[in-house]
Amino acid sequence: MVATLNDETVLAGDTGFQRRCRAAMIEQAIAVGFESSATADHAVRLEFAIEALLNPETAKLKVANATATDTSVIADATVAGTVPLTTGNVAAQALLVTDAHIRSSVTGSWIVFRLSI
């Protein structure tokens, strides 16, 4: 079985998952603030870093929605597509997503967040 768009939607809406995405977002925002201005797309990356730090509750929703679609993240939550996510089980299933997978997704998608504004 493959994870569905519904699984991704349910995961993105889980408040615990959103909080973890918020933490990864803040970590990445701080890292972007310290990166060299010569880094590719630094100015664009910095714009979202500033937004994330000034408005973390709003920005985390973009990050959670995108992160929930990451292949590794949704595979963790659905146990490789074998457990459909529901409002009744999502809190427990979201805890199966590794911090490493969340961080990797947030880091890899960073520039997209600014472009989506």
Image: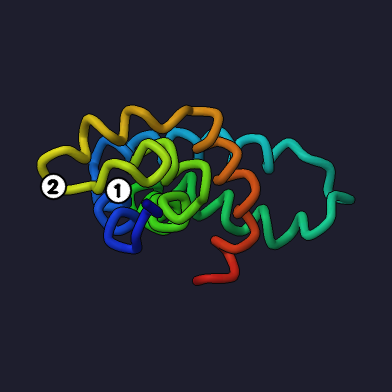
User: What residue do we see at 33% from left, 37% from top?
Assistant: 19
The quadrant holding residue 35 is top right
Q: Element at badge 2?
A: loop
Q: Position of residue 57 (x, y in %)?
A: 33, 48
Identify the amino acid type marked 1: Leu
Q: Position of residue 7 (x, y in %)?
A: 30, 54
Q: Nearer the viewer, residue 100 or 42?
A: 100
Q: Element at badge 1?
A: helix
Identify the amino acid type marked 2: Thr
> Badge 1 local density, few (<14 within 10 Å), some, or many (20+)?
many
Instruction: Evaluate whether residue 55 shows in this view.
Output: no
> Badge 2 local density, few (<14 within 10 Å), some, or many (20+)?
few
Q: Is residue 35 above or below residue 1?
A: above
User: What residue do we see at 37% from left, 46% from top?
Assistant: 81
The quadrant holding residue 22 is top left
Mark identifier at residue 87? 2
Q: Which residue is mark 1?
A: 11
Q: How many marks?
A: 2
In screen coordinates, is 22 left or right of 72?
A: left
Instruction: Evaluate whether residue 5 shows in this view.
Output: yes
State the separation of the CA atoms marked 2 and 1: 9 Å
User: What residue do we see at 50% from left, 37% from top?
Assistant: 102
